[in-house]
Image (cartoon, rainbow, N blue to C red):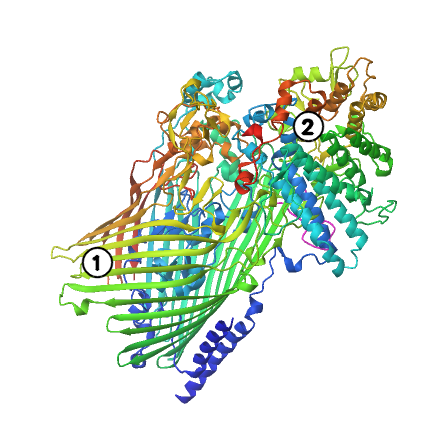
Amino acid sequence: MRKNIILRFLLCSTIAISAMFGTSSCEKFLDVESNHIVNEENKWKDINDIRGSLLGVYGLLRTALAENNAHWLYGELRNGDFTALNRRDLQDIVDGRLNSSAKLIQEGSDWRRFYAVINAANLFIERSYEVLEHDKQYTAALHEIDVAQMRVVKGFVYYLLARTWGDVPIWDKSYEGAFPKIKASSVDQVLTYAENEINAVKDKLPFFYGSFNDPVLPADLYLGSTSVKWSGVLFNRLSAYTILAHINALSGNYLEASVFADYVIANATRGGIAATDIADITNTTNVGFFFGNRIKHIIGFPFPNSSNEGGTDGHIESLTLAKPLVSKPNPDIYVKVERIVDIFNEAGDQRFRIDSTGTVQTSYFADFGGIRPIFKKIHIIRNGESGADGSLPFFTSTLVFSRFEEINLLRAEANAVLGRTELATAILNQSRKNRGLVEIGPNVDLIDAVFQERRKELMGEGWRWFDVVRYNKIKKNDPAFQKLIAQKGIYWPISQNALANNKELQQNTYWK
Amino acid sequence: MRQFYMINLAFFMLLFESSAVKAGDPGLTPGPKIAKERAGRARMKSKSNVDSLTAKSKFSTIPVLGSDTISVVELSKYPLVTLEQILKGNISGVYVQEPSAEPGTVQQNMLVHGITRPVFTARNFKENRPLIVVNGIQIIDETSLIYNIQNEETQPIGAATNILSLFDLDNIASIEVLKDAGQIAKYGPRAVNGVVYVTTKTAQAGDKKISINGYSGFAVPNNITTVNAEFERDFRQTFYDKYAGAEQIAAYPSYLSDSSNTNYYGPSNWVDQYYKLTPLYSINGALMGGTNRSNFRFFANHTQNASGADDTKFNRTYGGFSINMLPTTWFKVSGNIQIGRLARDRNRSLTERYTETKYTPDLSTPLAPNKSLYNLYLRNFDKLTLDNNYNTSVLASLGLDINIMPGLDVTSRIALDYNENRRDVFWPSTLMEGNNYTSNYLGYNERLSFDNNISYVKELNTGKLLFEAGLQIQADRQKYNYLQAYRGPNDYIKINKVEGDKNKANYLVSIGFIPYIYGDKTIHHLINTYFRTTYEWNGLKLSGLIRRDGSSWQQLSERWYTSYAVNGEYDLSSKIENDKIDILKFRGSYGHIGNLPNSDTEAAGPQYSSQLSWDKNTGIMSYNGVGTVSRPYSYGWVGYDVPWSFTDMYNIGVSLSMAKQFGLHVDFYNKTTKNMLLPVPTVAESGYKFEYASGMDVQNRGVDVSLNYTMPRSTGGFCWNSAFNIAYNTNELKKLPNQLDAIVVGKNKLQVGERIDQYWLLQNRGSYQSDAEVPVRDGDNRVMTYNGTDMKGGDPRWVDQDGNFDINNEDRILMGNIIPKWTGGFTNQFAYKNFDLSFLLYFNLGREIINQQASKKYDFANVAESKNLYGVREITSWEKSFDETAYPIYNPWSSVVPYQAEQDLFMEDGSFVKLKNLSVGYDLTKVVNNKKLNRLYVYVTGSNLLTITKYSGRDPELVNFYGYDTGTGIRYPKMYTLGVKLDF
């Protein structure tokens, strides 16, 4: 019996010791690092955190513009050249019924995605200096450039918010959990804020990221890669000036707008931008203008196929393409034949023309002889090599906000408004010449002609509605539209979600 | 923290200083034997001790009652494959929800005493589920991680098989549901939503025994009325006549426009291919025997279950082995291993396929109802398709049980629960616009636990004292790898084969396919300690428990939590001078128990993750090929110091047993779960969708009643056993975080003072026949609008609750019950001589259903335009499953969405009573009269025989967690089986 008791004790002690082993280190045992999130302790430590956060801000901006094809919902559809087919939600936008209860419109009216960009940019501005202490690779000069980029992004987002919703609140800090309810500032205040943000840093930005030839940042690598990776991806100096030109055009300060636009064009070669011929614009392969990141994208958001960033949503192709280019039987939106013929009414237009034999020559549209022409100007599928193969329509076209032609036409617009007719005409004629058109006649309304050219050139790039607004602000010849402007009907309604969570906000008058 | 160490210290002191032993699970395994008893005979010999669970520990304060256990023997006759189905209707207070009767599908949920957290997403289902314990092992649930990469939450990617379909009832000794604080506190923070305790049959000493059981039968589809395009055209004609404009007429669907098209206008005979009489069977055998010192039990089973619809089947191959060894009289080693493999032939529905492929092709033309066309479609699945769904599960434990001295036992056990979930899919190009698709999913969930318990019994002059203490360490690991690939070279290469050698240049480079690769992993560590004292004397039992739990899913500052529970019961029967009263017992318990978080996300506090994906493109992880990290804008802001959520619960009950015939058990409970973390919609300008704020309190109250009547076997040989259970449950939202009064999340609203399982609907009061009927406000001539859009003739007349002449969310009101107020079952067993007959009536009362199936039929205009899963029309949409005259005729193209499901027009009473099971058996043992034969019993059963309901849809039992009947789930077939049970 005695022996037994000893044995029993021995056994129990083994268990006890192993149990002790388990518990004595229990605090350690309960410290488990997550595999899919990064906590505060492990963040802002090295240059990789900088890269991840910086690109995260750009990525959020891309998401904001791409989700639900928002960029085109806001810019292309309303009052535009496209008609929706079997998509009453899209037709509601075309017809300006933005208070529709369609889910797409409800979601589109929510500006949260844009403020996520602002919050992320604010956070970067507030916290990125911490890396300076931990990682010697991250220098003060780099930090200054990164913060400058973030401020330009912020300015850009406020510009987008202002042109879409009008009066919006300004958030200058990330607030991190203690989120205040802030009143909306007026459109002018918002645009001024945006302009100031960019103005303060615009000349700190390089033309090229990761190029030894850049005057500001002469280094072969930026955040580990050369300019091949960053061109057309990160905002450079020309991006900043382009945004400034647009901010000023939106607020009607065409003098400033022309200055900024002039800067962009004057420095085009330094920044590597140039005119693109129509064959490149409409090229569907991997050398096409809309494929991947290009230095010519002054502001662009790529969805590279190589890292599976493409998809259906977020590309105008998901709305415009249909049989025979992809397997979808009908497009969601299309431009009616009569309207195409009406818009492209000049001989020699490389984008669309009917030649003397009555044959249609176009690189913008497919299946023109069918019931509905397919708008295929932008048409990039997967890796582009299989351009003709639309059976698996994962689109990878880059969302291009501005390119040489766009900013150049804005320059023409500004100069035309300022009465510098000669310069404006010259710019416009050059643009027209690039597309196979003759010079405009002496009796043509210059402003009309500029906007008409923008309409043709930028079709499907999300500009039409904002151009119409600017046009009407200049011309003031449409009383109904003036009323729309006065009642803030040119803006989208503020979403129920935003209104419900911030009682300081007020719905835009027109949508009350 | 100090508290924890003190408890530990106490535990170790006990361990070292004292000198006797007992084991396992002092609440549920056979109680410790008193030394003198043990001296005489080996402990395994006593059958009641090993095979019966209801006669549990002598010291347990758990009410040892029949009310919360099921009749395993009776239920083992029926073709029930999941734990949820087994419990359905058999235990009061348990509610089972399922949207589809597809055998073995993961889309089944179980609730004990209602819901404590509102359900907005599929992840929320889990948060309400009870803990499943099998032989003392806490079963690990499937991970929700996979939902992070899904566009739709119809069901999780992977095999999507219910792992609780592993067990065969013939190998189960008992299933109990533990509901109150006194019972569940021992199982720790996972047990707050109740515990379902499954005990498998274990080894026992004696001569070799063999038992063989089996049944076979058929799943018999229901009678279906089918329709073809003619019906659809006629149905739509009314709307076209009344409301269609030129645009609508121009867009008239082509499959309906040509009435000479026999594909659509011909016979609608697809049912012959879809619904088929399908065999189902089950066979199992058990072998047991051995000596008192070492004995074993071996069990093997194979089961096939089927629904008779869409060729869905479920197969289970399962083996169990248990062994007991007694090297010395004071030392016991017991091992138990259960291994099962589950395979499913899944449905071929479009919804589930597109959920998986994340690619919705053109939906404008539905599948044709014609048999030959449907056959052509099905042929794609016969040869070219690969769809393997396997779950492998291993439950193993090895326990040591040491009796140190009389009254003092130590047990130690190591246990592993591992389940693996695998799906390999290939769909040929003919199914999806010329693109083939392949995917491979491999996920596993693993829980390793190490349990140590010590118990000491002290006999006093006035009663007994039991001390127990336990320490449990659990390590969970959940992981998945998932690859989906599109557009392989042809339909014969079904696997995206890649180079696995890291050193080769083409490492993991896909050949031909366009691959997308995903993977994720979480780890959870949990430490549980508890100490419990129980005192028992003369019909009185009192017990107190205190525990301290630490979880790695809590933030550093809040890692540990102290929970406690007390309970007691008193049997008055001995005091009452009435020999008719066998038991008159009052009981009550109170507990305060911490709740675990549901993921590791909250533990990190303010955090960063990739945020680039959105609902329609969940695969996007990088920006121009660079991985990014941002604040969790779409998930929500998580702050520091997130405290533990906890549940305060109490219950009081009475049990009465009279004349050895009547039994009555009534329990009232009230449990309030407090401080729950809730994603609260936050200022949109913060960029965050939500802000995680703790402070939601939900109270659940209810009564569980069960009544038993046993008629003793009369001289004529007739006897009758009857058990009726009914449970009432209701909940109330007591508090929201940040002093909020109400919040709106999607289609739901949470309002303090109201239930959390309510619909939020518009009230429909007819229609506006013409534009002139639309009300206009005096004064400013404002026309009634819907979210700002003017209402017109042909729109519904919705009640403008706030009188502002705009119908919006403010006009939606909370109504209906998603979770039934009353659930229960009524079982009867009659026996006459060797015959017996039994049946179960199952009922849900006081609940409403949103008949979304009907709403979708009327909403054809939006369905046709929908580019997502809402626009999918399955082959079953050619069933006539709604009354085409029951609803008003609105303008289906109106932008106010007149047929939206979120209005009381589509809310229906979903109460029902079902004759769930019926069986007739005959005991042939005496007829055969063979010495070796202990039992020979044959029986026939029928399942899902009859439904009584006012509900107009297909089946009120098949409703999803949001209370919607989508009409897409597979129906319950009638099942008939013939079975035999043989014991040698």
Please provide percent x and percent y for residue B355: 53, 40
Residue B959 figure quarter: top left
Q: Judge from the rendering whether residue B969 lies leftward or rightward of residue A82; answer left or right.
A: left
Please provide percent x and percent y for residue B173: 34, 61
User: Is residue B555 covered in magenta?
Assistant: no
Q: Chain of mark 1?
A: B
The residue nearer to you, when weighing B852 against A155, is A155
* Whether residue B326 is situated above or below residue B763 in the rendered picture: below
Q: Judge from the rendering whether residue A338 lies leftward or rightward of residue B246; answer left or right.
A: right
Numbered circle sitting on residue A466: 2
Q: Is residue B857 visible?
A: yes
Q: Judge from the rendering whether residue A125 lies leftward or rightward of residue A206; answer left or right.
A: left
Rounded to the nearest whole Å, what is the CA distance between mark 1 and mark 2? 78 Å
What segment carries the magenta color?
A: B495-512
Residue type for callout 2: Phe
Residue under numbered circle 1: B663
User: Is residue B511 covered in magenta?
Assistant: yes
The residue nearer to you, when weighing B877 against B637, is B637
Please provide percent x and percent y for residue A317: 66, 30
Quadrant where the C terminus of chain A sits is: top right
Q: Specify whether disc 1 shares its chain with disc 2.
A: no
Residue type for callout 1: Gly
Identity of the residue furthest to the top in this view? A357
